[in-house]
Structures are given as structure tokens and as C-alpha cells.
Amino acid sequence: MKVFIIRHCETKKNIDNKFDSTATSDDLTPEGKEQLLFLCKFLNKHWENAPVIYSSPRERSVLTAKEIAEHFDTNYNIVESLPPINPGKLAGLTEKQAIERYPLLMDARLRFKDGLTNGYDICFPGGDSVYNYENVISERIHLLLSNNKDFILVTHRSVILALLNIFCKQLKGYRKDRYFYFDTPKGMILVLNTDALGTSGNLEVIGSYEVWKKECYD
């Protein structure tokens, strides 16, 4: 089974660098629209037939999934059970505001990104703990895999980070008692070739937008 997991193209919320919130609408930036054009060209090289397309529920993922579906003249399906991590009381805050209000939590996040602490130590007040979030994402991605059909999933940084942890542990032997940090740049694509259980196969990371844009010219 072939699965492409794609981080959505750039939107205004990416530029504002705020924690996830459903309170405001979103739209692709000019750069995000350019990314989308090259993303469709890139996918043309890897999908001969119209793929099954899923999207996380937030508008910024749906915008990308909708355009991919229109490009392939097919439909897309919103998976409500694959949202980004719930930041609880940090929803809608900028990084600067969050540091001022929750300095210990933000210091833990920084240490996690630097590889100095276990991501399982992070829990958002009024929101998700990383440990529980990984378990939820694992259950829901395996439900999609159990359909035993190739698909594309358009999603978010936190979902992709969880999926990297899940499949690096299942396929690459990473420690199961730690939550690892991986860089997840805009436009990142994971290519997963696996069985319906997600227990065998391989995982390939196709870096950032700039990486797969170059392939469109090769």
C-alpha cells in the first residue's frame, strides 16, 4: 500500500505563527498558492490514477486537499478524527504571548526541539498531552490503513510529527518510551509503503517544498 502524507501549503496562519485555533478563517498566501501548483505537478509524477484523498478538518488542510482533488478530477474526504494537537489555553496565542503566560511549558517545548527532553513531558493546559495525542493519531491512521487502499492525506505539522514517531517506532526500531522531535518544514511529504497494519514496510521523508519543487524540473 502506498500512502503520501503531506503537510498543507502555506497559509496566513503559518506566517502569524500562532497556536491552533478554530476561531478565525484562513487562506493560502501567494507563496502557498505557488507551492500548490508545484505540488500538483509533483503528484502527477507519482500517481497514475486519481488517488483517494483525505484531509484533516482544519481549513488550511482542506484548502490544499480541495485543490489536489480538483487537479485529479476527484473528491476528497475530511477526517474529523485527525486534527492538529489541541493547545488548550494557548489556542490563538503567538509564541511570544505563550512564553509570557506559560514560561515553563514553552521552555519544555524548546528543550524538546533541541533534543534535551522527552516530548511525552509536554501537556497543554486544558488541551492534549503529547502521550495521549500520539495514541489517538495512531488509532485513527491505522483505521485508514485497514482499508488497504492507497491514499493521500493532507494534514498538519503536529499530526505529521506524531506519525513520524509512530512509524519510526514500528518500522525503524525507535524507542517506544520516548517522543522524538523531527523537523517538519512547509510542504513536507512522507511516503509510506506498508501493509494494512502498518507493521512492515518503509518510510521515506521528502523534505521541504524546495526539495520536491526541484524534482518538478528534473
Image (tube, rainbow, N blue to C red):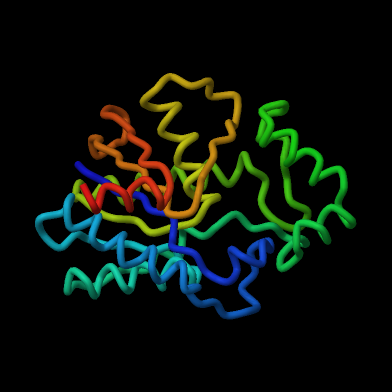
Say left or right for 130 vs 202: right
Say left or right for 218 vs 36: left
Q: Residue furthest front?
A: 217
Looking at the rendered image, the quarter that the N terminus falls into is: top left
Say left or right for 124 vs 166: right
Between 57 and 110, which is closer to the camera in this rendering?
110
Residue 58 coordinates in the image, percent (x, y): 50, 69
Tell me the residue at 28%/27% (across/down).
200
Quarter of the image where one finds residue 19 = bottom right
Q: Is residue 53 above or below residue 139?
A: below
Residue 49 coordinates in the image, percent (x, y): 10, 59
Tell me the residue at 87%/47% (across/down).
103
Q: Is residue 62 above or below residue 112?
A: below
Q: Residue furthest left?
A: 48
Tell me the residue at 45%/67% (across/down).
32
Tell me the residue at 66%/28% (across/down).
115
Residue 209 coordinates in the image, percent (x, y): 41, 52
Say left or right for 89 vs 8: right
Between 155 and 43, which is closer to the camera in this rendering?
43
Q: Residue furthest bottom?
A: 25
Q: Is residue 109 above or below residue 57?
A: above
Residue 197 coordinates in the image, percent (x, y): 29, 36
Count of numbered labels shown in the rendering = 0
